């Protein structure tokens, strides 16, 4: 096998952070002589990067392993990621899996691939999560217009529903110097937009090896990144409301590169449920953050994470969340249905919500999300915006996003791919996408 090119295929489940880490693992294997192929191809090695935020993600992993075995029954299957750290033995029992790597081992994957013949028994290399106290910087460049840049990993919060601290370890960060170096590398590849990602990016600045002291703040990181000339746009992905400071909001409002788009987890609009979840804020603070953003950036897009069906969430408390969100000037929701996770506090809580009721509440909030998105898009019509066009060609149409995250479309033109253009937002079509009029043929500088 060493005398010929080995092939590797990747499948990523879960969050943006996982996508950035898969890209880093892929670059590592490329440096070790592997050629990347599609997951549906017959590859020598299949790498599955897993998530474990919901029970569904675990089931999904089984399906992906089966898909790999269909593509090549002799393929060597490696499972990494959060699920692999939390339940390595469970994965080891899945038919077809040859190697399971935990949080610390996944970045050294090449070291474990000396022999890629199918195994009688699955090999597991998974550290105790306390050992995942080092930091590996990563970024993804699968998309020609946008890259996910990891700046932080792990979490020191103890939310009662969450397994992420068990899967990823303590909060730790990249150095400012290394983040800037990665941002410049991304820029050199012609990519125009960076999305900052991590587990708890507002906690940015904690060093390695459990050093709780912040060497830098998130605001300092944002200020440094704003100096990277070659990047046109930077988005802040999910950031905790208690860590999104007014100074950061003010800086973004005047920034050269940071766009007016925030994604702020709420999880519940009921203070009683927020306390049970051990979140570090109450609904008033969340309202303050949204109000502040609207004051300094009236056109900003604000996305919200929310969980339905948490133990003890009565109909009355759910309606508190519903009404809070309904009145809040936000732009869209990501709705999650609570699912019981082993080794979390919440699994012991009383007041379990019926599965059918969880689904009903999820549907109610998804309908509210569509209304919010529609209202937000409506409020942006007849405005002039900069759009970064993406490379997909779907039935002769191409798509892009404005700085404040309105999805728009126009007729496909290969010359526009990865270009920024000034457009007028004209109307919302039947697919909920905004049609535009090209304001000028010149591309935006």
Image (cartoon, rainbow, N blue to C red):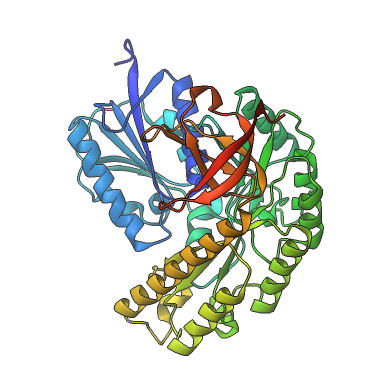
Please give left or right for residue 20 compared with residue 122 in the image: right
Taking depth in this image into account, of 246 and 365 the one nearest to the observer is 365
Residue 206 horizontal side relative to residue 395, left or right: right
Q: Which of these two is toward me, 287 or 100?
A: 287
Choose between 343 and 397: the one closer to the eye.
397
Residue at image point 79% right, 62% down:
246
Q: Residue at x 40, y 87 (%)?
A: 351
Tell me if 385 is positioned left or right of 140 in this view.
Answer: right
Q: Quadrant of residue 33?
A: top left
Can residue 162 be seen from the camera position used here? Answer: no
Question: Which residue is pictured at 59% across the width and 49% down the height?
Answer: 405
Q: Vertically, is 397 above or below 6?
A: below
The residue at the point 57 percent across, 29 percent down is: 418
Screen quadrant of the N terminus: top left
Screen quadrant of the C terminus: top right
- In the displayed structure, would residue 185 be above or below residue 289? above
Residue 194 coordinates in the image, percent (x, y): 62, 38
């Amino acid at each position: 096998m060493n005398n010929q090119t080995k092939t590797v295929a990747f499948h990523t489940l879960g969050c943006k952070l996982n996508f950035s880490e898969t890209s880093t693992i892929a670059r590592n294997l490329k440096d070790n002589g592997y050629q990347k192929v599609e997951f549906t191809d017959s590859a020598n090695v299949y790498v599955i990067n897993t998530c474990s935020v919901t029970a569904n993600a675990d089931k999904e992993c089984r399906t992906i392993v089966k898909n790999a075995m269909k593509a090549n029954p002799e393929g060597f299957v490696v499972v990494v990621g959060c699920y692999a750290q939390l339940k390595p033995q469970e994965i080891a029992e899945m038919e077809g899996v040859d190697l399971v790597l935990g949080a610390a081992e996944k970045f050294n994957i090449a070291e474990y691939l000396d022999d890629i013949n199918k195994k009688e028994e699955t090999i597991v290399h998974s550290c105790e999560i306390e050992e995942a106290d080092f930091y590996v910087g990563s970024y993804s460049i699968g998309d020609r217009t946008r890259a996910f840049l990891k700046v932080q990993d792990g979490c020191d919060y103890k939310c009662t529903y969450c397994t992420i601290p068990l899967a990823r370890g303590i909060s730790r960060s990249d150095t400012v110097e290394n983040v800037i170096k990665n941002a410049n590398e991304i820029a050199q590849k012609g990519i125009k937009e960076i999305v900052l990602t991590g587990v708890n990016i507002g906690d940015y600045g904690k060093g390695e090896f459990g050093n709780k002291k912040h060497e830098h703040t998130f605001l300092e990181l944002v200020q440094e990144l704003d100096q990277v000339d070659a990047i046109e746009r930077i988005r802040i992905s999910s950031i905790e409301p208690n860590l999104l400071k007014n100074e950061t909001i003010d800086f973004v409002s005047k920034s050269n590169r940071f766009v007016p788009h925030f994604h702020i987890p709420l999880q519940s609009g009921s203070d009683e449920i927020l306390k049970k979840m051990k979140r570090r804020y109450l609904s008033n603070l969340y309202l303050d953050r949204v109000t502040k953003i609207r004051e300094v950036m009236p056109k900003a897009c604000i996305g919200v994470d929310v969980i339905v069906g948490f133990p003890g969430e009565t109909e009355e408390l759910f309606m508190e969340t519903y009404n809070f969100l309904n009145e809040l000037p936000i732009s869209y929701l990501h709705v999650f249905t609570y699912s019981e996770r082993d080794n979390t506090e919440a699994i012991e809580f009383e007041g379990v919500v019926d599965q059918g009721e969880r689904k009903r509440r999820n549907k109610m909030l998804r309908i509210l999300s569509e209304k919010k998105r529609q209202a937000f898009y409506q409020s942006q019509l007849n405005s002039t915006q900069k759009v970064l066009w993406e490379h997909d060609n779907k039935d002769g149409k191409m798509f892009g996003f404005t700085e404040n995250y309105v999805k728009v479309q126009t007729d496909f033109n290969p010359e526009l791919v990865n270009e920024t253009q000034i457009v007028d937002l004209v109307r919302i079509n039947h697919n909920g996408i905004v049609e535009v009029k090209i304001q000028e043929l010149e591309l935006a500088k």
